[in-house]
Image: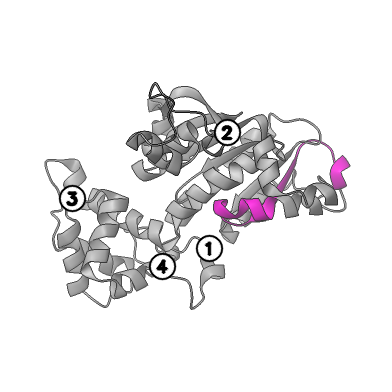
């Protein structure tokens, strides 16, 4: 953990601050240990040598609540700035930060820890909650809860929507017939019962199918779609200064589609209006400017960037990554 932050810190100046945000306390602990020389403390204060690093435990979708509080605690903003109305700040572009980098999806640390339940290659509890121990309460939905309690049509919808899974119905039926499921191995076995080990089309083999099903469950368990939309439409426009950059690294088509549309149109709602031909029009049929639908972003580059072959060789998990960049208007 902390690789992106380390690279950023190596290019920053005295007094610059990088905030590492993650809902997983284990990830923050690993990043803090790796970046201990940069960690900002009350004793060092704002005058410590070199750039600084601080951590914040929250979801991307909650940054509009938690970043101002942290900046106030660190003495980076005044009480007056902290109390400023978020809607005014968002419209004026008078944000707090010069840029936000969102690295979406599950981390290598989480995948490599069987006890977290994200990986299908090793046995572990069927959990998948990003928050780890902190989210282990009676109100937090786990992957086991979904597999054991959701009906057939709900499971099919999850696998189709979040995994583009062609065998969604067969897999959902197999999961229901295999109940109760409590481990990742049991879920893998339920998938394997209706999926060949190998297929002439690689994406239809067992490994690729397990990856899609596990991904689908993880997205629902952690409400990732809503959290991403909340961050892109609300948090990022409020906190990035005019001229600042928003950088998003996504790992599957749903994340990238949401990111692309928000960067291009400002919100998913605006994108739908444009797609359906909605919005106010003048006498010539041209869409009139509407302040409520103005886009706070300007695209940097026309297309998302994929990892190079060299990058994939260094890190095979970067193969599915897509990077998009936008500038705050």
Q: Nearer the viewer, residue 191 or 76?
A: 76
Reply yes or no: does residue 266 show up in magenta: no
Q: CA distance from mark 2 to mark 3?
A: 37 Å
Q: Earlier in the sequence, mark 1 or mark 2?
A: 1
In the displayed structure image, the side of residue 234 where residue 44 appears, left or right:
right
Q: CA distance from mark 3 to mark 1?
A: 30 Å
Badge 1 density bin: few <14, some 14–19, many ≥20, Cα 10 Å: many
Q: Nearer the viewer, residue 88 or 66?
A: 88
The image position of residue 198, as x and y in percent, is 14, 48
Q: Who's the residue at 75% across and 44% down the image?
A: 37
Q: CA distance from mark 1 to mark 2?
A: 31 Å
| Residue 135 versus residue 234 in the image, above or below | below
| Residue 217 versus residue 45 in the image, above or below | below
Whether the residues at callouts 3 and 4 have beta carbons within 8 Å, the answer is no
Residue 66: quadrant of the picture: bottom right
SS at badge 1? loop
The image position of residue 158, as x and y in percent, is 29, 58
Residue 252: quadrant of the picture: top left
Whether the residues at callouts 2 and 4 have beta carbons within 8 Å, the answer is no
Q: CA distance from mark 3 to mark 4?
A: 24 Å
Which residues are the magenta region?
A: 45-67
For label 4, the residue is 127
SS at badge 3? loop
Q: CA distance from mark 2 to mark 4?
A: 37 Å
Give residue 301's mark: none
Asked whether residue 118 is in view, the answer is no
In the displayed structure image, the side of residue 287 where residue 181 appears, left or right:
left
In the displayed structure image, the side of residue 285 where residue 74 appears, left or right:
right
For label 2, the residue is 296
């Amino acid at each position: 953990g902390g690789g992106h932050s380390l690279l950023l810190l190596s290019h920053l100046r005295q007094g610059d601050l990088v905030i590492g945000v993650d809902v997983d306390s284990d990830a923050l602990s690993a990043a803090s240990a790796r970046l201990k020389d940069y960690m900002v403390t009350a004793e060092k204060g704002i005058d410590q040598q070199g750039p600084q690093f601080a951590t914040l435990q929250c979801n991307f979708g909650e940054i509009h609540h938690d970043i101002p509080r942290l900046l106030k605690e660190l003495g980076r903003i005044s009480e007056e700035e902290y109390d400023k109305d978020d809607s005014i700040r968002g419209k004026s572009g008078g944000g707090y930060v010069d840029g936000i980098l969102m690295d979406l999806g599950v981390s290598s640390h989480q995948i490599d820890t069987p006890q977290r339940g994200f990986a299908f290659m090793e046995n572990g509890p069927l959990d998948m909650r990003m928050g780890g121990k902190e989210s282990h309460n009676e109100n937090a939905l786990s992957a086991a809860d979904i597999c054991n309690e959701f009906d057939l049509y709900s499971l099919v919808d999850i696998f189709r929507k979040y995994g583009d899974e062609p065998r969604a119905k067969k897999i959902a039926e197999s999961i229901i017939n295999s109940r109760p499921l409590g481990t990742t191995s049991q879920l893998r076995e339920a998938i394997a019962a209706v999926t060949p080990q190998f297929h002439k089309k690689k994406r239809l083999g067992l490994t690729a199918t397990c990856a899609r099903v596990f991904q689908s469950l993880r997205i629902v368990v952690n409400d990732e779609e809503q959290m991403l939309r909340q961050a892109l439409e609300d948090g990022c426009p409020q906190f990035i200064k005019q001229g600042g950059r928003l950088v998003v690294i996504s790992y599957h088509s749903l994340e990238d589609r949401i990111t692309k549309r928000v960067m291009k149109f400002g919100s998913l709602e605006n994108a739908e209006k444009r797609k359906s031909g909605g919005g106010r029009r003048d006498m010539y049929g041209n869409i009139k400017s509407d302040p409520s639908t103005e886009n706070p972003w300007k695209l940097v580059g026309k297309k998302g960037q994929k990892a190079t072959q060299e990058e994939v060789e260094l890190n095979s998990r970067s193969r599915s990554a897509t990077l998009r960049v936008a500038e705050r208007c």
